Image (spheres, rainbow, N blue to C red):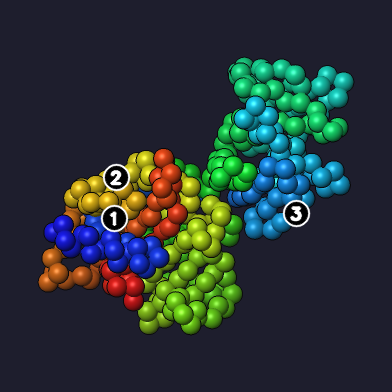
Amino acid sequence: MRRRIRIHVVALFIFACSLVVNSLVAAEPAEENKLVPEEGAYAFFILEIGGSKMIFNGKQEEIDPGYKTSPVLMNGKTLIPMRAIIEKLGGSLSWDASQKKIDITYNSKRITLQIGSKTAVVGDSKVQLDLEALVRKDRVMIPLRFVAENLGCNVYWHGNNTITISTNALKDTYSADRFSADDLSIYDAILKKQIRLGMTKDEIDAIYGFKPEDPFMGRYEYEGLQVFYRDGVAAGLLVSSGENLTTRFSTVRNVTFFSPKSYVQKKYGPSLEEVEDVPDGERYGTYLFRKEGSGAESTLVKLEASPPFTAPKDNLYYVSFLYDESKDRKVTFMLIGDYEFGMLGK
């Protein structure tokens, strides 16, 4: 069994992240296990310390048009002209110059900060800051992480200078002990569409527009989502951080790039690598499911071990993740596919 799993892991890695292996437990999907988008528009930002431009949902623009204001580091903390971020999120920021007070509202949340004060008001509660808001070159600069996280956004660092900020695309409704056909899909947060295994090329082209086949990889590229078709039907879905630095694409359980391994384990349970103690398996998270039933009534049974090579492989599916080498082991690759695609890439 160990030899078979090692072969699986090697196959996935060579595939640019096509995994293998298995896991898990059965259960009918709970009523709450449904895809529920968050309110408001999805937003994803990439910013650079010292850079006056940002990338917002894939497009570059100035953070603070006409002022060339850029994020800065002070005492190890990041400050930013936050108005651009708040307004892109659909919220508002007001500045009372006479009282040197900033009011931020977003999705019924309100934050008040005072220039020179390390005490902020979040809703009805007072919260202490590590660094106070300040005025720099006539622009109000606000502690980025404090404001973003108190507004329900995610903040990630990449190296020493690059920051990404994103909203959550989906509500957290799925538990680790119940699985359904929803788990065989990738969610596009910008278009608010679910791309499922089994969809035809015509159906996916209707969402993204017609795409030609990649002659080298044999896949179709849809704005960062790769789809492999077999007989005109989607048999494999892949998303790689090599083509994306956004959280636009996720599983229905809100696993996306930058999700730590601990979160994946929380939403999917232990991976096959953990269950069978695969050597050097800490960078992989592979889950194998058997589909039972059809259509909207189908369920997924999470398997605890790879089936024998002679066993039928119909209705078997992989959900696989590759992690980086950081302390938190963040997701850098996601694969969802049927058994033939997950094992052989075809």
Classed neighbour count for the residue bearing mark 2: other residues with Cα under 10 Å, few (<14), some (14–19), many (≥20): many
Q: Position of residue 235 (x, y in %)?
A: 37, 72
- Decide if residue 22 is on the left or right side of residue 84: left
Q: Residue at x 75, y 41 (%)?
A: 70
The crowding category of the residue bearing disc 1, from other C-alpha atoms within 10 Å (few below 14, some 14 to 19, many at least 20), is: many
Identified at 65% across, 58% down, the residue is 58
Name the amino acid type tagged 1: Tyr
Compare marks 3 and 1 and give the one earlier in the sequence: 3
Horizontal side of 208 relative to 68 (left or right) equals left
Residue 230 spot, x, y in % from top left: 37, 79
* Numbered mark located on residue 287 in the image: 1
- 235 or 32, which lies in front? 235
Nearer the viewer's eye, disc 3 or disc 2? 3
Asked if marks 2 and 1 touch (Cβ < 8 Å), the reply is yes
Q: Which residue type carries mark 3?
A: Glu
Count numbered badges in the picture: 3
Residue 143 visible: no
As rendered, which of 111 and 108 lies closer to the eye?
111
Q: To which residue does mark 2 refer?
A: 269
- Which residue is rendered at x = 47% and y = 69% of the image? 226
- Work out whether mark 2 precedes mark 1 in sequence or the reverse, and give the earlier one: 2
Q: Position of residue 284 (x, y in %)?
A: 33, 53
310 lies above or below 299: below
Query: Of marks 3 and 2, which one's residue comes earlier in the chain?
Result: 3
Secondary structure state at the residue bearing disc 1: strand
Q: Quadrant of residue 231?
A: bottom left
In which quadrant will I find the C terminus?
Answer: bottom left
Q: Quick check: 234 left or right of 85?
A: left
Residue type pointed to by label 2:
Gly
* SS at circle 3: strand
